[in-house]
C-alpha cells in the first residue's frame, strides 16, 4: 500500500469513528460538523458554505433539516440585514458541545494499538498538518 492509500484508509478510520459518535447523538456527521462550526459564534451562511466545502444550495438543505430539529436558526446580521447568519439554539449548543467533547476524547482511540512513542509522533505530525493548513480551532467554551 502506498502513502496515498494509507492516508485514504486513515481518513476512513477517522470518518467511521466520527460517524459512530454522531449516530450515538442522533446527528448526521454533516449536522454535527455544522453545529460545531457555529457553537461558539454565529457564522455567515456564505462563510459556512466555503468552510464546509458545500454549495450554497447543499448548505441551505442541511440547514433546513437541522433547523426543523430546532438546533439552529437563521437570523439577519445586525450590520447588514441582507446577510444571513446561522446561530445555534440552546439545544443545538448542548449537542455541539457533546459531539465535540466526545470526538476529542474518543478519536485518539484509533491509535490505541500504537506505542506511546508512536502516539506522540502521530500527535506531532497531526498538529503540524493542522497548523500548516490554516484551520483555526474554535475557542473552548
Image (cartoon, grey):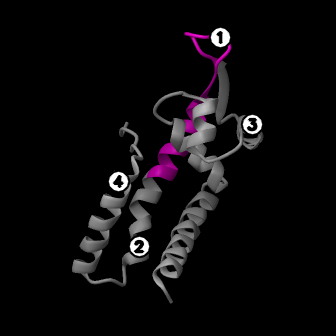
Distance between mark 4 and mark 3 Cα atoms: 30 Å
Q: Name the residue under label 1.
A: 81
**Sequence-first tag of 2 and 1:** 1
Which mark's residue is nearer the viewer, 3 or 2?
Answer: 3
Q: Give the range drawn in magenta.
A: 76-100
SS at circle 2: helix
Q: Residue 60 shows which numbered tag?
A: 3
Q: Residue 109 carries which label?
A: 2
Q: Position of residue 14 (x, y in %)?
A: 51, 68
C-alpha span from label 2 to label 1 = 45 Å
Crowdedness near tag 2: few (<14), some (14–19) or many (≥20) residues, C-alpha within 10 Å: few
Which callout, 4 or 3, points to the residue nearer the camera?
Answer: 4
- Quote the CA–CA distance across marks 1 and 3: 18 Å
Identify the residue at image location x=64%, y=33%.
72
Q: In this view, does 123 lie above or below 48?
A: below
First in sequence: mark 1 or mark 3? 3
Residue count near mark 3 (Cα–Cα under 10 Å), binned few <14, some 14–19, many ≥20: some
Q: Do labels 4 and 2 touch, CB within 8 Å?
A: no
At horizontal 48% and vertical 86% (from top left) the residue drawn is 2
Residue 126 position by quadrant: bottom left
| Element on which disc 3 rests | helix
* Viewer-side residue, 26 vs 49: 49
Q: Does the magenta stretch include residue 58?
A: no
Of the residues tagged 2 and 1, which is closer to the observer?
Answer: 1
Amino acid at each position: 500500500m502506498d502513502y496515498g492509500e494509507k492516508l485514504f484508509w486513515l481518513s476512513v478510520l477517522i470518518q467511521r469513528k466520527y460517524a459512530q459518535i454522531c449516530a450515538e447523538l442522533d446527528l448526521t456527521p454533516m449536522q454535527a460538523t455544522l453545529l460545531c462550526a457555529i457553537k461558539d459564534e454565529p457564522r455567515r451562511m456564505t462563510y459556512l458554505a466555503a468552510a464546509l466545502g458545500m454549495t450554497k444550495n447543499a448548505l441551505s438543505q442541511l440547514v433546513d433539516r437541522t433547523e426543523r430539529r430546532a438546533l439552529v436558526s437563521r437570523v439577519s446580521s445586525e450590520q447588514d440585514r441582507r446577510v444571513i447568519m446561522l446561530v445555534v439554539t440552546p439545544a443545538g449548543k448542548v449537542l455541539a458541545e457533546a459531539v465535540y467533547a466526545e470526538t476529542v476524547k474518543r478519536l485518539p482511540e484509533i491509535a490505541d494499538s500504537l506505542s506511546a512513542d508512536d502516539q506522540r509522533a502521530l500527535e506531532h505530525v497531526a498538529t503540524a498538518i493542522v497548523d500548516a493548513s490554516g484551520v483555526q480551532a474554535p475557542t473552548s467554551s
